[in-house]
Image (cartoon, rainbow, N blue to C red):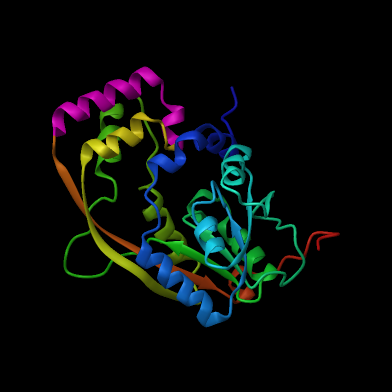
Amino acid sequence: MARPSVAEEFDQIAGVYDATRDPLDAPALDALVREFDRAGVRRLLEVGVGTGRIALPLTERGFEVTGIDLSRGMLARARAKGLARLARASAYRLPCRDRAFDAVLFVHVLHVLERPERALAEAVRASREGGWAIVHPRRTGPEPERPPDEARRLVREELRRAGIPVPDRGGPAVEERRILERLPPSRIVTLSERTVTERLSKRLDVLAARAHRYTLRVPPEALDRAIATVRARVGDAETTTRRVEALATWSDPATFGAPPTAPAGAG
C-alpha cells in the first residue's frame, strides 16, 4: 500500500493539531510584527498556513494575509476561524504574479518540504522582500544543547526495542538547522528566547493523540504500548529546554540558481 502524502497526513491530524501545538509566544509575535513594520510589509502570503494559527493573529493586527496549503483538512480548520483569503496550492508553484506580495512567510514549514530551495526561490519571485521563515536556529553558548523533545526520543527508542524501526532525522528543529546551513539566509534575527519546563507526561499525551505525522505510520497497539512503558518509567519527571524562535530571510535569487517564472495566467 502506498504511503500517504504529506498533505494526506496533515488531513489526518488536522482535528488535533491546534490542541497539541504550542502557539507562537507573544514576544515572538510582537517581534515579527516589528520586523514587518520595519520593512514596510503589509501584504503577506503564508505558505503552509495550516489551521491559521499565525495568519489569524496577524490578520487581527491589520495585515492582509493570504494563506495556501495542500491539506484540505487544515484549510477547513482555518476557514472555520473566519479566515477567507485561503487557497489550496503548492509551495513550489505559487499561484500569483511576480512581486505580488510584500513578503512570503513560512512558519516552521521548511523542514516539511522535500525541496525547500524551490519553495524559497518561489517566495523570492512572488514578493518584494523575499522569503521569511520562522525557524529554530542552532544555539550558541557554553551549555550543551538538550534534545528538543525528550518524550519523542524515548518513545522512538522503545519502538526500536520492540522491533519497529522509526526513521529519525533529529526532529523539526534539527532539520531546520540543516536547511539554514545548506541555504544560508540573507539575514537572521532572534525573535524570542525563553526557558520552558514541562512534564514529560504532557508531551506523551501529544504522541498518544497521534498528533505527529510519524505516529500515523506506527501500528496503534505498538505505539500505545511504547507510550505506556515510557510513562511508567518517567512518572512525574520534567524536562527543561531553551526555546529560541528566529526569523530568517532570503532575498537573493542567486542563492537558488536560475529564478522560476510565474505560472501562466497567474494574477
Residue occupying image coordinates x 52% and y 78%: 37
Does any portion of residue 161 appear in the rendered image?
Answer: no
Locate the N terminus and report the quarter of the image it occupies: top right
Q: Judge whether 110 appears above or below 167 on screen.
A: below
- The residue closer to the viewer here, 142 or 79, is 79
Q: Judge whether 130 appears above or below 5 on screen.
A: below
178 vs 264, left or right, is left
- When asked about the image quadrant of residue 223, the answer is top left
- When asked about the image quadrant of residue 129, the answer is bottom right
171 vs 260, left or right, is left
Residue found at the far right of this picture = 265
Q: Judge whether 247 appears above or below 209 on screen.
A: below
Tell me where residue 130 appears, x and y as whole percent: 60, 72
Magenta segment, which residues? 213-235
Tell me where residue 57 appears, x and y as whole percent: 50, 59
264 vs 38, left or right, is right
Tell me where residue 159 appears, x and y as whole percent: 30, 27
Q: Is residue 40 in the magenta section?
A: no
Tell me where residue 187 appears, x and y as whole percent: 47, 77
124 vs 39, left or right, is right
